[in-house]
Amino acid sequence: MLEAIGNIPWDSLAALSSPRILLLLLLGVTGGLAVGVTPGLGPTIAVALLIPVTFTMPPDEAFAILTAVYVGGMSGGALTAILLRLPGTPASMATVLDGFPLAQRGEAGRAIGNAIVASFCGTVIGALFLVLLAPLLARFALKFHFAEYAAVSIFALTSVAALTGSSTALGLLSAVLGMLLATVGLTQEDGLPRFTFGLTDLQAGFRLIPALIGLFAVSQLMKTPIFTRAESSHDLKLDPGGSYLPSARDVFANKMNYIRSGIIGTFVGVIPALGGGPAALIAYAQARNASADRDRFGKGSIEGLIASETANNATIGGGLIIALTVGIPGDPTSAVLLGGLMIHGAQPGPQLFGSTPEILYGIYFSLFISSMMMVAVLFAVGRYIVHVVRTPLYALNPVLLAMCIYGVFSLNNSLGDVWVMIGFGCLGYIMEHLRYPLPPLVLGLILGPLVEGNVRKLLGSEQTLAPLVTEPLALGFLVLSVVSLLMARRLARF
Amino acid sequence: MSSPRSAHFLFLSCLVLVCAVLFVRSFYLPRFDWDPVGMAFWPRVLIAALLCLAAWISITSVRSPDTYSPTRPDTRGFRLPALSLLYIVSVEPIGFLLATPPFLFLLALGWSPVSGRSIIRGLAVAVVGTFLVLAVFQLGVDVELPPGLLDR
């Protein structure tokens, strides 16, 4: 660790504090935030849109602005998740659970303030791991083979199903339903259609973003029925005197929560294909498990909000660790970012530490400064953004729905995705009324193909599922899954 | 759906029906010699798990009705997806610029408190909303919105 600090090329890093690069970082964070708050658009699109703009930039400037957009895009989703129950990306899904109830209670400012600080802490924890333990964590990630992938996915699903919502049985059914819905479309292993009923639009399966926006945003809009002849009113209250700075009590009471969620986010981030959504939900479930006030979770708990935001931002550092040291992107945004960095001369691999450390540490410092800029920008504009809840319902809801429709349409220029969004909106509306938690369903959609693919590959290569219990890492995750279920049983939530 | 409990049973019955359809369809999926389990294996595992959980939840809610405390979904909530589907069907042939303002106008009217100013408010939302979507998606991120009739 000390060797890592000693290797930091301080001279080249001083160049990063030039006014031009600081300005680019500020622009990148602001632009990323603007894209992040738009439904359907997230950090992946923000980074992808920016790559052509960076072609003529020197590498240090390009790395700086690309990283800043990544940080801004990740944080932007939190604002809409809290204020509008609209998670732009899976990473913000757990933020909705407590952020929106806080806004409904008139504590939108407090929720945003805590989310900002948690995002900052998460990014910094992930970045610290990136600079200090990257080779070690990359070796950990490379231990993941078929059995480990299947086991960690099962652990994520069971822990979230067991510890979110009001009942474990409802959570498990929600997770299994999500995995079953994920079997629709072309299978990854065979490349053949399954359960598409001859419909071309279903060949790509149920895409995640339309499902996510449908489940959370459309179902929320449906809760205020149109043409009821009654005067529609806002669910949200606004406390005009409320502070946007989190109180010292909120921050200090959650110091272990920040650390635990940051570590979970970083470790989940280094495992390719998991990403911010599962990380935030695992951290959320663990925060609930560790909390003395478990009943408040899902009804406006600051602890839940902090766990989610810290973990999803920590995955930035975790994702970059595996992307830069091994060349395997942890999530789609890391994949696009990696492409952009490679265009500017970064060659991922272990040699990055020895041959061109200035690139690695440049990215790390950009990440660190970007997260500080993000805090400054959000505190500056948060006061105004929070007033979106004052917009009358008849003006806000139609525009929001139109933005959701075209945000989803813009993903593939396909109205089929919009049908999927509306369908999932109805499903989410019904399931919420029947008390089924929605996060396990989304997690099932994300992790279902991962579990299936790895179980089938395991059976194909080993002819047995025994490695699930003979490999120590896989066994460890399965034991944790059982512990989660037993814990739920102990809490009489089954 | 007369009561929350019957709504819950209706939902579980629909799930069982979907499982039955998918289970039957799984027999039509191809299987290759090199694949030890085939592409029907995983869905069947999930269908079995889903049926077990549905049975458990049904039995538990019959034995102790207050276990899950569901609420009955308000069927008026489905007016919004119905109107949205009508819009989605019409937007491709008619076009974004012609279909969106009436859609937003109707939505604004639907969510507006009943008053004499509803129509003016609705018109304002229709114009501003359409321009906003156009600015963000067509001008901002270069998405080609359905041109419809205006393309001819």
Image (cartoon, coloured by chain):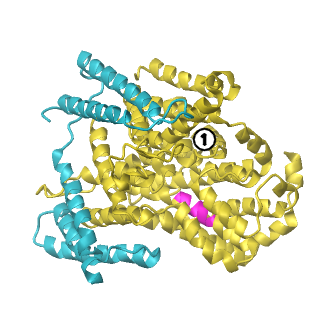
Residue in the foreground of this view, choosing between A415 and A286: A415
Q: Chain of mark 1?
A: A
Q: Position of residue A77 (x, y in %)?
A: 48, 57
Which residue is more in the foreground, A295 or A125?
A125
Report the span colored magenta.
A68-75
Residue at left offset 55%, top offset 55%: A116
Q: Is residue A52 above or below residue B31?
A: below
Extreme residue toward the top, this view: B63
Chain B palette colour: cyan
Residue at 70 percent across and 78 percent down: it is: A57
- Identify the residue position indicated by label 1 in the image: A261
Q: Is residue A214 left or right of residue B121?
A: right
Secondary structure state at the residue bearing disc 1? helix
In-image side of B56 versus A91 (left or right):
left
Rendering coords of residue B140 (x, y %): 46, 76
The answer to whether residue A345 is seen in the rendering is yes
Quadrant assignment for the N terminus of chain A: top right
User: Residue A346: x, y in percent?
Assistant: 76, 64
Chain identity for the colour yellow used in the image: A
Q: Determine crowd level at label 1: few under 14, some 14-19, many 20+ residues with C-alpha closer than 10 A.
A: many
Main SS type for the magenta part? Answer: helix
Residue A81 in which image quadrant: bottom left
